[in-house]
Image: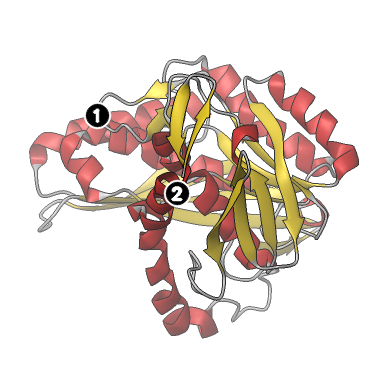
Amino acid sequence: MEFKDVGFILDFEKLIKEVQEFEGVSRKSSIDNVVNLLGEAYNVSGDVIIDIGDDASAVDIGNNQVMLVAADGIWGQIMNVNPYWAGYCSVLVNVNDIAAMGGKPLAMVNIMSINNDEIYEELLTGIKDGCLKFGVPMVGGHLHPDAECDSLGVAIVGIAQKDKLITSFHAKVGDKVIVAIDLDGKPHEMFSLNWDTTYDKDAQLVQDQITAVQYLAENDYIKAGKDISNPGILGTLEMLLETSQKGANVNLMDIPKNENMDWADWLKSYPGSGFVFTASEDKCDFIIKYLSKYSIEASVVGEVTDENVLNVTYNDQTIEVFNQNKNPVFKL
């Protein structure tokens, strides 16, 4: 069904189908195989305090503190086309994983496999510039100089207060769903779904966006959260809902959007600074106003339900985007 709205026509059913079939969503399904094989090793120490499926794992280190640990690999297609951007993004995605948990990023290490020596310098320069932008050191790593292909993986550690941790497991029925994105950006010239909000910004503002989420966590404003990543806005929200075993009803037009982006690209974009949160209704106004100080536009877009289904409404039509019994993202 098509709707006319403020000068444009939106094919809502086509839009939702694009989201459901988006590669950034479908690639998450393979995580299930890894979990099945390594599940017994996940908490062999007994110190891991949250289950598999969050942006970072949290290890109890005493004194009401947890060490946050995360890792990300960079798609080979980005490495081959723009190794500089691959290096830069390897820092960005890891820092955002720690930020999404309400933590402080501390340090990173990397594993690089290099087949093409021509990309080596660009890749390392991108990593260096990312570290300078986000203020997080790259303290070591491992290099395969004669690999069969080019690849990059980065791991990060952070720290957070144990009783103030943001996880994706704590969404509650009746919570409001908040989408928070820095709209002051542009699509990367080579990767249209990379919504770049950090590269041209002052490093202090970029770092302040990270500490802003930490502040909200430490002052009990946010119940659950994730950084918006490869599955896009709705795919990321669905991952949060799956780990919380909840659903949500969302109004499409309440999602913050840059006016120059069409909805299909916007819902699939990976923003430099973007999060989905849940919070009690009385906390929402403060969250929205506080994040606006740091160039992050936040809006209440819906509400958490107990139905294990993510529904999205546009005008008078509601479509079931994800159903945890039929087409989950994680499949854990």
For residue 138, say whether it is visible: no
Lateral position of residue 113 relative to residue 89, left or right: left
Q: Percent from the top left, x then y, of residue 242?
A: 61, 66
On screen, residue 230 above or below 290: below
Task: Give amino acid for label 2.
Answer: Glu
- Camera-nearest label, 2 or 1: 2
Q: Secondary structure at mark 2?
A: helix
For residue 174, say whether it is visible: yes
Seen as rendered, the residue at the extreme right is 282
Residue at 70% across, 21% down: 292
Lateral position of residue 209 relative to residue 144, left or right: right
Instruction: Report the residue marked by disc 2.
Output: 13
Q: Quadrant of residue 118?
A: top left
Residue at 41% across, 75% down: 34
Q: Percent from the top left, x then y, of residue 250?
A: 65, 47
Lateral position of residue 322 relative to residue 144, left or right: right
Task: Give amino acid for label 1.
Answer: Met
